[in-house]
Amino acid sequence: MTWELYVDGSSNKIGSGASIILVNEEGTQIEFFLKFEFPASNNHAKYEALIAGLKLAKEVGATKVVVFSDSQIVTSQINGEYQAKDPNMKRYLEKTLEYLQQFSDTKVRHITRKLNSRADALSKLASTKLGGNNRSLI
């Protein structure tokens, strides 16, 4: 079964967090946001969101995944258009590629922030809330 995965990560002075929105072909939608208990740059938070989203997709039985992210850096690194030079970004990229290999078919697409507005809003909410009590909604 193919699932669409919308992800975003956010980092600011208060903290960092991520959001995941999974939608299957039948219209079932799962939304999840995470508050990180560690410091993360904006790009690191976006990778964390993607990795968490891929784990969740695997848990719900997805065999094919189409990933949508408004991060041109992350999507371009995954698709081989940009190099990851920073050691931390290289590790995030390697881990992400490992998770992508668990699916029979994957696509990673860059979309505008406007098209990713729900995930963007949830990631900002996650990054500014007090710690603990991550939330999900089906």
Image (cartoon, rainbow, N blue to C red):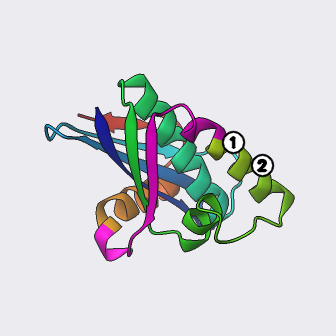
Mark 2, other Cα within 10 Å: few <14 / some 14–19 / many ≥20:
few
| 99 sits left or right of 129 in the view | right
Counting from the top left corner in percent of width and height, residue 44 is at 66, 57
- Report which quarter residue 78 is drawn in: bottom right
For mark 2, what is the residue? Answer: 91
Category of crowding for the residue at label 1, using alpha-carbon neighbours closer than 10 angstroms: few (below 14), some (14–19), many (at least 20): few
Residue found at x 45% / y 34%: 104
**Location of residue 68 by image quarter:** bottom left
The answer to whether the residues at label 1 and label 2 have Cβ atoms under 8 Å apart is: yes
Q: CA distance from mark 1 to mark 2?
A: 6 Å
> Where does residue 19 sit, x and y in percent of width and height?
43, 50
In this rendering, would 17 be left or right of 83? left
The boundaries of the magenta stretch are 98-115
Q: Which residue is mark 1?
A: 95
Specify the amino acid type for callout 1.
Lys
Q: In the figure, 56 relative to 59: above or below?
A: below
